[in-house]
Image: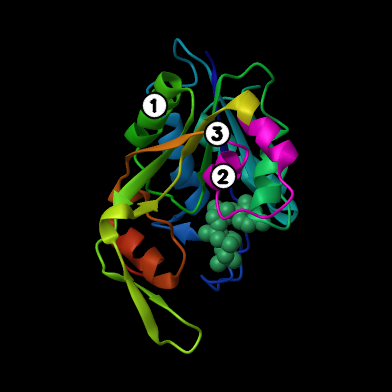
Amino acid sequence: PSVAVVVVAAGSGARLGRAEPKAFVPLAGRPLLAHALDSVFGMGEGLDGGRSVQLVVVAPASRLDEARAIVEDAAGVASDRVSVVVGGATRQLSVAAGLAAVAPGTGTVLIHDAARALTPSALFDAVVAAVESTAGGVIPGLPVADTIKRVDASGAVLQTVDRSELAAVQTPQGFPLPELLAAYEAATEEFTDDAALFAAAGHPVSTVEGDALAFKVTTSWDLRRAEQLLGGSAQ
Ligand code: CTP
Ligand code: MG
């Protein structure tokens, strides 16, 4: 069965605080989006391999041409298996825009944040394999290292949360396409991630082991960490 990857890159990056949208901020001299696409094109399936992988990049309207150039550069050749579409005002709307461009009949779709620019290709492969073996939703999760407290609005500690029951989740998140499309159709509220939207439609979601390199570049501190991991100088 075929695989599609939707990379959402249409956010503004308010917390990063740069002039350009986050996916277009340079990391070691290349836009975050270019790094993210390296991982997609490194998937075991490969765009030209035995199984075809479709790539849909969701970009801000103001950056469509730049996104197309980055995608073409990453793909190496012009291909009808890659496309760039305009995103929406929220991440959920951007994912919906990307899903609308996924070929009908696709078996498994992965939704990935461009901001998780250093995610290893092996994590994409692991999520695809787990979706195909479970037929449910699959998300990468990591144990939570810090002790977590429930606090009220004034900052008073109410409770210590049992850490053994917690996972910090990442992307790519993988789903059987027909069920995810139906879940998006049915969604009437804003969910924090695609797995929550999928679960709200009554479908099971399980975790695979996440990867520390799949961290999300959210603040300038994260960008500095990514630069250091790539061996470059901090900006
Ligand atoms: N995203 C998107 N469309 C939106 C909002 C977010 O495609 N309307 C994408 C971002 O480009 C990012 C991913 O969703 O790759 C995760 O979102 P986040 O890290 O929150 O990025 P931003 O929303 O851009 O950042 P911020 O919340 O700091 O503004
Ligand atoms: Mg955001």
Q: Position of residue 41 (x, y in %)?
A: 45, 30
> Where, by quadrant of the figure, is residue 96 drawn?
top right
Indicate whether 215 appears above or below 184. Answer: below
Q: Is mark 2 within 8 Å of ligand 1?
A: no
Q: Which residue is mark 2?
A: 194
Q: Looking at the picture, which amino acid does disc 3 mark?
A: His
**Residue 83 visible from this viewpoint:** no
Q: Position of residue 156 (x, y in %)?
A: 40, 87
Q: Nearer the viewer, mark 1 or mark 3?
A: 3
Extreme residue toward the bottom, this view = 154
Instruction: Please give the name of the residue rendered at 51% of the width and 42% of the height, measured from the top-left corner.
Output: 112
* Quadrant housing the C terminus: bottom left
Instruction: Please give the name of the residue rendered at 69% of the width and 31% of the height, measured from the top-left corner.
Output: 182
**Is 194 colored magenta in this rendering?**
yes
For the record, the magenta segment spans 180-202
Q: Which residue is mark 3?
A: 203
Q: Which residue is mark 1?
A: 130
Nearer-the-camera pick, 173 or 37? 173
